[in-house]
């Protein structure tokens, strides 16, 4: 299974970029992964179109937003494990611009995930998602990192 974070805009904060790269580097020891940075559009619909274009056909799609499902790290790991066992080939996680994600796009995603009821900068959300993906894999493998 291949995972992807599809995000609007580039990470400009060097510290958050370094942390994100650290977790993505660890994650790649478990499964293939890609980070796709898209140019912000003039409208949320433009951004949604770009995100759809960056996603392989048949991928599981997960929109990150405030009204998504809140999960523990163990519950999130179960999502990942179910996809792995079920033969899913590709999972894309979407992080929108500062204006969020297009409402129709969010509704079209198979899952919606909230990292927290609080609002975080998009760069921080990307770093947190990378960490949680790595943590999920350590939980699935029974490794001690997640404790």
Image (cartoon, rainbow, N blue to C red):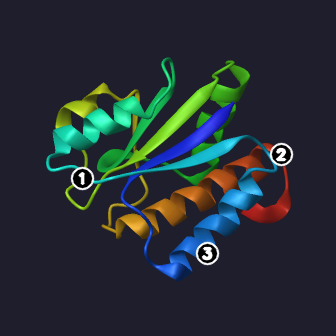
Horizontal and vertical percent position of residue 113: 41, 45
Q: Please tell me which residue is depicted at 58% across the width and 58% down the height of the picture.
A: 130
Distance CA(mark 3)–CA(mark 2): 25 Å
Would you name the residue on which mark 3 appears?
18
In this picture, residue 8 sits left or right of residue 77:
left
In this picture, residue 19 sits left or right of residue 54:
right
Marking on residue 84: none
Q: Please tell me which residue is depicted at 54% across the width and 82% down the height of the picture.
A: 15
Between 129 and 66, which is closer to the camera in this rendering? Answer: 129
Which label's residue is closer to the chain start, 3 or 2? 3
Element at badge 1? loop
* Mark 2: few/some/many CA within 10 Å (<14, 14-19, 20+): few
Q: Is residue 106 visible?
A: no
Q: Spot the residue most to the front.
A: 39
Distance CA(mark 1)–CA(mark 2): 33 Å
Which label's residue is closer to the chain start, 1 or 3? 3
Horizontal and vertical percent position of residue 117: 33, 61
Quadrant of the image for the C terminus? bottom right
* Mark 1: few/some/many CA within 10 Å (<14, 14-19, 20+): some
Distance CA(mark 1)–CA(mark 3): 24 Å
Q: Spot the residue most to the bottom.
A: 15
Horizontal and vertical percent position of residue 66: 29, 53
Q: Please tell me which residue is depicted at 58% across the width and 44% down the height of the picture.
A: 76
Element at badge 3? helix
Would you name the residue on which mark 2 appears?
141
Would you name the residue on which mark 1 appears?
100
């Amino acid at each position: 299974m291949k995972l992807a974070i599809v995000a609007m805009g580039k990470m400009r904060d060097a510290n958050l970029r370094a942390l994100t790269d650290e977790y993505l580097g660890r994650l790649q020891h478990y499964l293939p992964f890609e980070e796709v940075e898209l140019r912000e559009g003039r409208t949320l619909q433009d951004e949604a179109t770009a995100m759809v274009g960056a996603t392989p056909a048949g991928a599981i799609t997960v929109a990150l937003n405030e009204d998504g499902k809140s999960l523990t790290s163990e519950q999130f790991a179960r999502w990942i494990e179910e996809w792995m066992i079920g033969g899913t080939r590709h999972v894309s996680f979407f992080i929108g611009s500062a204006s969020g994600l297009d409402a129709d796009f969010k509704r079209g995603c198979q899952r919606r995930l909230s990292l927290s009821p609080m609002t975080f900068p998009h760069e921080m959300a990307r770093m947190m998602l990378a960490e949680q993906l790595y943590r999920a894999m350590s939980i699935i493998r029974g490794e001690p990192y997640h404790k």
